[in-house]
Amino acid sequence: MTISEPPPEASVETGFADDHRPPPPAGGLDRLTIYAAVWAVTSLFHLISFGVWVTEPVGIALFAATVTLLLNPRSATALCAAAAVNAVYIFLRSPNTANHILFDGVVNLTVVLVLLPKLLARGPLDRDDVFERLGLPLRAFLLVLYFFAVLHKLNRDFFDPDVTAAGELLRQLKERFAFVPTGEAVIFANAVFTIVIETAIPVCLFFKRTRPIGLLAGLAFHFVLALHPHQGLFSFTSMLFLLYLFFLPADFDRRLSSWAAASPIVLKGLTLFGLMRRRLVTLLVVGAVAGGLAAAAVLVSGVDLKSFRRLALVVGVIAWVPWGVAVVTAYIGVLKTVPETAPRPTPWRWRPVLLLPAFMTVFYLSPYFGFGTTRVLSMFSNLRTEGPEPNHLFIPQALRLTDGFQDDFTYVSETNDYRIDRHTKTGAPLPWFEFRRLAYEADRPFIATYERAGERHTVEAGPGDPLPFPRPHFLATKVLSFRPVDVTGPAKSRW
């Protein structure tokens, strides 16, 4: 396979330069439309992965906005509305969101901040200008994600075959594919490979000369990762495939059209899709609504949620595999296609929206400052910054600004709340802040017996009864969340 590249330049070109190119023909398939269509499909995979939205009004609004965008991906208004609803929904759901879902919410806030002023301005919308304005912050977001995914894994326990998340994921994968090896040497090699590939991908993406290598490596690695049975992984891969659009050549919409026209199979498929588009979309909408109603009925009826989630994940993977294959094939087709003209690089321009990636960079450092330990891209990292035995290889505990959050442990011995019980049944304590947050969110009556600072307490609170400890501040609960702590010994693999 020959991958075409623009002519070499005299200077090093990075991912922080916009590419100048002529606008596509009026009415043609442009980059913003492609982004919107892939955004809508990605949103559906998020909703499949985390089905609690069916019981929440804003979640249902997000589903409606996603379907609306899927029906009309050329509508910049529909894209802005869907991104806005997504950002609002994730704020309302916080802190009960996965790592990449919070990340996705901030990315969508960026989309709104870039797109809304353009929609409110007079005159026609310059769709290429919008896409290029999105490109700089969204490329920065993706590089930040990879940086912290690697940084948090650089700890002693990630390389310990007995406890590393790299081994845990392999053992879970073996349940689906019996041929997967899980020996100690294989697990250690997998941990090392994970660090190498998650470092190589963003480094290659950063430089234009090596960007096709980074894209191919990322597509292959994350496609395989999406086949893992853990909840949310195909949702995570879908999000990354969406952001990879901003690392393609600036004329990728033209290349995509040229590649499709030169491939009889693809052209026939696109023609068939065009003829059946309304029927296919109607089928998708009806199926999604029926699935949503069935999910709502299950959640309300109190049927075993674990079984239902497993079924939803199986359905999601079955739906995701053909989509993933199609996306990977399209990326390869774009990279193989000879460019019509070489794009001319122009210096990147400072824009206030870049403050969002900068803010999230500080947020993702919060474990080392003594603050939140979840939703900071520390998933499957074995990282421990709490207690007397932090395990990072080179970041010192001296960076802590406070010990009041991470090291104030609460040992729960009995509770009727399933979330607290799920977190603490192994004996690992919860930080006091997290215990209070979960207690105030728990259904009543709430019962718990716990030990804190050497003192034993029992709480029994019925409907309307106050709890004997203060509620955490509302805004603090939106920003801070904590995982259970393996205070001593190896830090086990956690989400």
Image (spheres, helix red, strand yellow):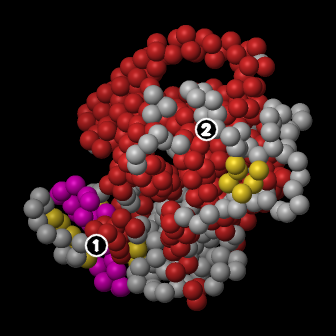
Magenta-tinted stretch: 438-456
Q: Residue at x 24, y 72 (%)?
A: 471
Q: Residue at x 74, y 32 (%)?
A: 255
Q: Residue at x 31, y 63 (%)?
A: 438
Q: Which residue is mark 1?
A: 472
Q: Is residue 173 visible?
A: no
Q: Quadrant of residue 160?
A: bottom right
- Horizontally, is 74 left or right of 182 in the view? left
SS under mark 2: helix
Q: Amino acid at mark 1?
A: Pro
Q: Position of residue 379 (x, y in %)?
A: 57, 59
Q: Which residue is mark 2?
A: 31
Q: Amino acid at mark 2?
A: Arg
Name above or below for residue 391 compared with residue 339: below
Asked whether 85 or 312 is in front, the reply is 85
Asked whether 238 or 13 is in front, the reply is 13
